[in-house]
């Protein structure tokens, strides 16, 4: 995307170097890299272990400052805190075990001081949308891993983010559940019109869900390929049987194989 004003989220010359310790050198984790994400785009990032995928999400979310470069969301600089309009979902189960599903989902709205009626309306909608209506009074310990991730996504959804950042949210789930959760994520994306950036280690997940997939190099992570999938917006997990799906995953692996070997010291 050449028109800077058209980007919903934008990174320019971003690097992240972690300081070294007494007996350890600094770690150049990321960049320099540039990225434009269009409004309403579903963009996924894949790369070898330790390449800086999660670091990329952290700097875009304002959770970690870049060592150099600039990050903008909706034209405004991102620095020091998660911007208004950005929601983040992590791989780890972030539900509060002492709260019911309903109260977990309501937590952020109550903390923001939203009035009771609007909070109830938004929470009921998000719980229903994520298929959790029958479990609103349940506690996380009573739910499966996939359902707990739905709770975390619902808690983000009620805040109505315009940019949703997901850091391997389905990484701990089995393959079948991941496919079904992918369908739910696509439905959420279409319903809300939000822009989505997904970090994933699963090439099939990236190929199925995304408008574009960015392939990162071994550390320090930079983009070595940007793959446009060409999928229709109304897609779901049935596209895994499309011949084009195999071609996309093959291209992703072709770009990634050498970098993965570098990451494990084999090249």
Image (cartoon, rainbow, N blue to C red):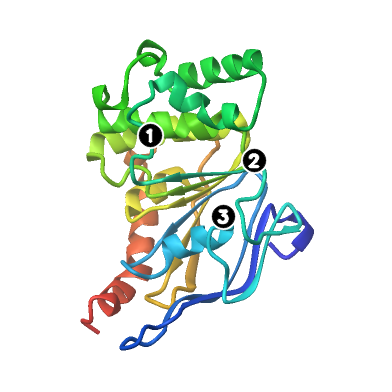
Q: Residue at x 34, y 54 (%)?
A: 203
Which of the marked residues, 1 or 3, is nearer the chain's N terminus? 3
* Disc 1: CA contacts within 10 A as few (<14), some (14-19) or many (>=20): many
Secondary structure beneath label 3: helix
Mark 2 touches mark 1? (CB < 8 Å): no
- Write down the residue under mark 2: 162
Query: What's the distance in space between the residues labelled 1 and 3, CA to CA?
Result: 20 Å
Which of the marked residues, 2 or 1, is nearer the chain's N terminus? 1
Quadrant (top left/top right/bottom left/bottom right) for the C terminus: bottom left
- Write down the residue under mark 3: 61
Question: Which quadrant of the figure has residue 34?
Answer: bottom right
* Horizontal arrangement in the rendering, residue 75 relative to residue 267 (left or right): right
Q: Residue at x 60, y 51 (%)?
A: 82
In the displayed structure, 151 sits above or below 245; it is: above
Quadrant (top left/top right/bottom left/bottom right) for the N terminus: bottom right
Secondary structure beneath label 1: loop
In the rendered image, residue 229, in percent from the top left (x then y), is placed at: 49, 51
In the rendered image, residue 77, in percent from the top left (x then y), is placed at: 72, 61
- Write down the residue under mark 1: 95
Question: Which quadrant of the figure has residue 50?
Answer: bottom left
Q: Nearer the viewer, mark 1 or mark 3?
A: 1
Closer to the camera in the image, 9 or 20: 20
Closer to the camera in the image, 148 or 184: 148
In the displayed structure, 255 sits above or below 244; it is: below
Closer to the camera in the image, 53 or 67: 67
Q: Residue at x 37, y 87 (%)?
A: 25
Q: Residue at x 30, y 32 (%)?
A: 146
For the question of whether residue 187 can be seen, the reply is no
* Horizontal arrangement in the rendering, residue 259 relative to residue 119 (left or right): left
Q: Nearer the viewer, mark 2 or mark 1?
A: 1
In the displayed structure, 162 sits above or below 252; it is: above
Query: What's the distance in space between the residues labelled 2 and 3, CA to CA?
Result: 12 Å
């Amino acid at each position: 995307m050449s028109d800077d004003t058209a980007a919903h989220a934008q990174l320019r010359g971003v690097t992240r170097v972690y300081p070294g310790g007494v007996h350890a050198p600094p770690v150049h984790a990321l960049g320099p890299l540039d990225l434009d994400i269009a409004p309403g785009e579903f963009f996924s990032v894949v790369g070898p272990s330790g390449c800086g995928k999660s670091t990329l999400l952290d700097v875009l979310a304002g959770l970690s400052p870049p060592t150099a470069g600039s990050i903008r969301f909706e034209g405004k600089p991102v620095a020091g805190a998660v911007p208004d309009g950005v929601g983040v979902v992590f791989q780890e189960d972030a539900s509060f075990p002492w709260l019911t599903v309903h109260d977990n989902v309501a937590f952020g709205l109550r903390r923001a001081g939203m009035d009771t009626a609007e909070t109830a309306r938004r929470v009921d909608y998000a719980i229903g949308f994520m298929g959790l209506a029958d479990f609103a009074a349940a506690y996380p310990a009573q739910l499966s891993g996939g359902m707990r991730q739905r709770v975390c996504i619902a808690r983000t959804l009620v805040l109505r983010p315009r940019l949703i950042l997901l850091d391997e949210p389905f990484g701990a789930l089995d393959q079948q559940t991941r496919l079904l959760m992918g369908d739910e994520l696509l439905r959420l994306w279409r319903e809300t019109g939000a822009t989505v950036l997904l970090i994933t280690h699963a090439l099939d997940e990236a190929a199925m869900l995304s408008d574009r997939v960015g392939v990162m190099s071994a550390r320090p992570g930079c983009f070595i390929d940007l793959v446009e999938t060409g999928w229709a917006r109304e897609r779901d997990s049935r596209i895994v049987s499309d011949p084009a799906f195999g071609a996309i995953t093959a291209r992703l692996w072709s770009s990634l194989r050498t970098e993965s070997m570098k990451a494990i010291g084999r090249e």
